[in-house]
Amino acid sequence: MVSSARNALLILTGLMFWTLSGAQTGKVVSKGLFGSDPGKFSASLESNSIAYIRDNGLGVTGPEDKFGSNNYLKMDYSRGHLSAGLQVEGYMPALYGFEIGQQADAKKFLLAAKYIRWTSEYFTFHVGDIYDQMGNGLIFRTYEDRNLGFNNSLEGFQAAVNIKDWFGIRGMYGRPRLYTSYAGSWVRGATATVSFNDIFGWDGILFNIEGNFLNRYESLDKDDLHDFHALGLDNANLNSYSAALNFSWNGLSLKAEYAAKGKDLYSETATGAHIGAAIYAEAIYGIGGFSASAHFRILDHMGTMSSLYGKGTGNSLSYLPALTRQYHYMLANLNPYQVNGRGECAVQLDLFYTLRSGSDRNKYWIFRANASSAFTIDRMQSDNGERRLLWMDLNADAECHWNRQLRTTFLYSRQEWSPSHGYEEGTYASNIFVADAQYKFNKKYALRGELQYLYSKDYERDWVAALAEFTFAPQWSIYATEMYNLGETKKHYYTAGVSWSKGKTRVQLSYGRNRAGYLCSGGVCRYSPAYTGVNLLLTAAF
């Protein structure tokens, strides 16, 4: 099966290059399968390189190889019903702290993604790397996140049928990518969707239901290092199911999903196999300048690994992001929450209101209040059998646009979290204050500044931070940041940089210290060690 899949992918790659060469030369047959349309070709390049410097003041030497570089070249082509693409990646080696750099063959170039797809009114056929999601991702989601340094696409085949938008079904089969290679497992699944608003012709109403099935097969006896039977895992087949509904009408949007899975290990650190279950509910309502949302989720051993033999953030088939606010200020992101895969009950509430001046359209205010919390659900997670707090935050911020030139933002955030992930009773608490202002002198010049303060009696105690950025539109920007611990470490973490943009090309050069801690993207986190270095980032689109 593996050799036949490889042969199919070699044929796919050759066909794609033939198609791309026809698009580049413009020599296409005027009649026949594709007609005279030369199609559309697009490409993007991203290169992120860091030269690491020994920093005695920070107390780190950096990686043994004093240079790291992650590079991505993506090309896509479409013509009529046909589309194709590929992505080439190069790690020379991978950047420090990225789990892809911990693989045995991480210093390499590889054909990381490739596909060819045929889409018509009713049918879609896809061969190559599959990026898809079932429901809200509780049992399956494949995607790429370069900030986290992983890509868990499914290499295989997918087919879909869509009947006049009211009924759709799609199925897939393949093997998941695990960093620079592929996992030893095989995954197959199917999704069926029914749209009642299309069946009954309802205007202004969306109502559909979705059912999902996923199977992962992997041998339990590949080596002598893993005794899965001793952990209670006896079946090489893992089956997962979910049912979801979506409803929206007159500014109201409702989502709900229930998911369950068979006996499995929720992570590589699990000490025993368990069945899993999850409930997710979401309600959003908006009218005029006001909107409110509520999210609720219970997870019980729902983490699903791509491979039982794999490790790291990228070894995942399910998507279980933290149900908390995503911050973009330095001190608010100092200790982000990480989902407890063993089990948690989480809720998030969000209120948003925009108030506009009746006399000046350039003057308006944006107010937001947000709160979230997460608790353990498994009494065995704590030292005394009680359910414990994992995370809680409360946020309030106001953004004021005073006129064309001046904008200010003020944020208060209180965060409380368990350093033992709920096992022990104690928690840490932080109070964070942020003032952010931007002033536009004219259409070309703008200055932005931030002042931040974190007050805490716990962990590393108080912090201060600041940012200054001056923009010369539309091409140049210079910035500097400083983050200093007033409490335990007395260390400075600073960055200074300059960026240049023209069209779809952007180059950024910076130098600075980076604190050890968790970096998050979309609610999913990876650990990054401390380092000092010079960073060159290039992005371009063609």
Image (tube, rainbow, N blue to C red):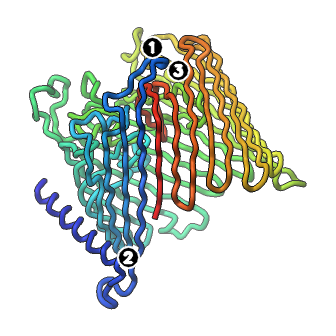
Residue drawn at x 66%, y 29% as measured from the top left? 466
Does label 1 or label 2 sit earlier along the sequence?
2
In the displayed structure, would residue 423 be above or below residue 39? above
Q: Label for residue 386?
A: 1
Q: Amino acid at mark 1?
A: Glu
| Marks 3 and 2, how far apart at CA | 52 Å
Quadrant where the N terminus sits is bottom left
Among the 4 quarters of the image, the one containing residue 502: bottom right
Q: Nearer the viewer, residue 152 or 50?
A: 50
Residue 422 position, x and y percent, is 45, 17
Does label 3 or label 2 sit earlier along the sequence?
2
Local crowd at mark 3 within 10 Å, few (<14), some, or many (≥20)? many
Among the 4 quarters of the image, the one containing residue 95: top left
Q: Nearer the viewer, residue 69 or 283?
A: 69
Does label 1 or label 3 sit earlier along the sequence?
1
176 lies left or right of 56: left
Q: Nearer the viewer, residue 28 or 420?
A: 28
Q: Which residue is mark 2?
A: 79
Residue drawn at x 27%, y 69% as measured from the top left? 17
